[in-house]
Amino acid sequence: MGAQTLPPAWQLFLKDHRVSTFKNWPFLEGFACTPERIAEDGFIHCPTENEPDLAQCFFCFKELEGWEPDEDPIEEHKKHSSGCAFLSFEELTLSDFFKLDKEPRTRLHSIKKTSALECL
């Protein structure tokens, strides 16, 4: 099953799909916070006019901006959202995917989830 056939919210579980959201990302090769590394740690790129480097975790919806080239995405994610369930999985298996998708979410998270999908 390709990413295109998955519901939009499920597509975000695929690292390659998250990487594809990083258009005009300022830090590429040679930096710690490349699109690949940030996407691996659950983030998608949601730039705004005032925050061109805004990234949001697709799962906990934590937004981070003001990235420095040498910042480690996983450490920043842990520091700012240590309770994110996505961080507890080293490699996402199909079973993990279903556990995460069933994770209870608040109304606020549902609202933020909609805004995360708008980044796509």
Image (cartoon, rainbow, N blue to C red):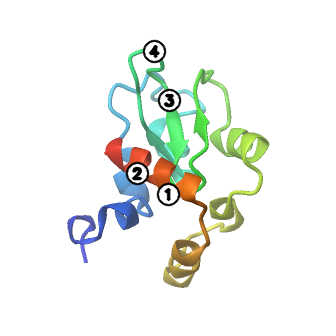
Which is in the foreground here, disc 4 or disc 1?
A: 1
Q: CA distance from mark 4 to mark 1?
A: 24 Å
- Mark number for residue 114? 2
Q: CA distance from mark 1 to mark 2?
A: 6 Å
Give me the residue at 49% from left, 81% from top.
94
What amino acid is at disc 2? Thr
- Tag 1–tag 2 contact (CB < 8 Å): yes
Please state, as top left, top right, bottom left or bottom right, where the C terminus lies in the image. Answer: top left
- Classed neighbour count for the residue bearing mark 1: other residues with Cα under 10 Å, few (<14), some (14–19), many (≥20): few
Kindly state the secondary structure of the residue where label 3 is placed: loop
Q: CA distance from mark 2 to mark 3?
A: 16 Å
Residue that carries the numbered disc 4 in the rendered image:
50
In this rendering, is residue 103 above or below 9?
A: below
Q: Earlier in the sequence, mark 2 or mark 3?
A: 3
Q: Earlier in the sequence, mark 4 or mark 2?
A: 4
Residue that carries the numbered disc 3 in the rendered image:
54
